[in-house]
Amino acid sequence: MNYKEEIIKLKNELDVTIAAHFYQKDEVFELGDIVGDSLELAKKAMNCDSKNIIFCGVGFMGESVKILAPQKRVLMPKVACCAMAKMIDVEFFNSNLKILNQAGISNDDILPITYINSSAAVKAAVGKMGGYVCTSSNAFKIIQKGLESGKKIFFVPDRCLGQNFANQIGLKSAVIGIDDIEDVKQADIICYNGFCSVHQLFTPEDIDFYKEKYPDIIVAVHPECDVQVVNKADFIGSTSQLIKYITQDLDPEQKVVVGTEFNMVNRLRDKNTYVLSSTKPECPTMNETTLKDLYQTLLSIQNETFENEIEVTSEVTKYAKLALERMFEV
Ligand code: 13P
Ligand code: SF4
């Protein structure tokens, strides 16, 4: 079967918008009616005209759209769970708060901020405590806004994002479970011990290798990379910021090595043939979605069986939405 042709046919017949994240396989990405990073897709999807949204990405992204636009039907060809988002649930969130409480920091002195890469339930727990959601493109602003409260920031689940932004602002950070509890008590930004297994593939040695081989090369990385990698980089940016920097700001002849997900890096080569990547860091969960899955999801809309429909309870929606809306206000 030619899935591509069948998908285009069905998509033209049905009341549906296909959203595709930049990390999707090329053949899926090219069929997206809307494409972007997680924040752009959430905004575009909630404002689109269709009743049905097929979200090609990872679970937390589909959930975010459902929370922001509960009147829409959100379906995912694969409800693949981002490895980092899976590192935290409400129980872990609460047990980490308990560690802080036992160290003498009360919940009244803590403002939680969750990276968008977390479940709706974790976002709701954060929302209940007056906290925020952030993405890698607005984390700097959200953390600064959070600091205005005079409280300590409890940043979940990505320790790297918390540490890297603390360094950029010149603040002290510490990771629960890694750093000494006395350091945690002194920190302005207290990080949960989660990380992205894909962005962990980039090492400081990779950067040294490229800089030695091509002395004028530029190193551009995502802030989910380790602190030691980010400290050696020339440019640090979210998914969309990296795309803009490489395709618009850099000379097309400039050699650049990029530390982020492979599908996106590879696509950048259409604009700049000197884009290099130290490994082939494909995100396994983003890569789960295939054309066949997308076709079957469309078919389920036609048959009204609605496979892999995303549901979020009204209680979770209420508080998770608060945390997301606080982000949009900033
Ligand atoms: P964006 O928020 O930039 O889309 O990134 C999500 C992500 O999973 C990065 O690894
Ligand atoms: Fe999650 Fe990392 Fe994949 Fe992004 S690249 S979706 S953070 S596992």
Image (cartoon, rainbow, N blue to C red):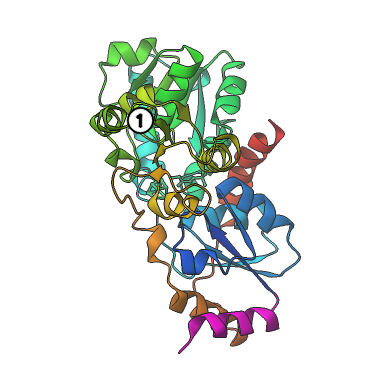
Q: Which residues are magenta?
A: 1-15
The picture places residue 53, in percent across and down from the top left corner, at 63, 67
86 and 36: which is toward the camera: 36
185 and 253: which is toward the camera: 253
169 and 83: which is toward the camera: 169
Residue behind label 1 places its C-beta within 8 angstroms of ligand 2: no
Is 214 on the left or on the right of 79, as rendered?
left
Q: The N terminus lies in which quarter of the figure? A: bottom left
Q: Is residue 313 above or below residue 113?
A: below
Q: The C terminus lies in which quarter of the figure? A: top right
Q: Is residue 3 magenta?
A: yes
Give the residue displayed 62% in from the left and 83% down from the top. 10
Give the residue displayed 68% in from the left and 38% down from the top. 328
Q: Residues within 10 Å of mark 1 (few under 14, many from 20)?
A: some
Residue holding disc 1: 96
Q: Is residue 269 above or below residue 293?
A: above
* Direction right: furthest residue: 49
**Residue 188 sits in quarter:** top left
Is 181 on the left or on the right of 231, as rendered?
left
Q: Is residue 275 above or below residue 35?
A: above
The amino acid on which the numbered mark 1 sits, given as a three-letter code, is Asn
**Residue 260 sits in quarter:** top left
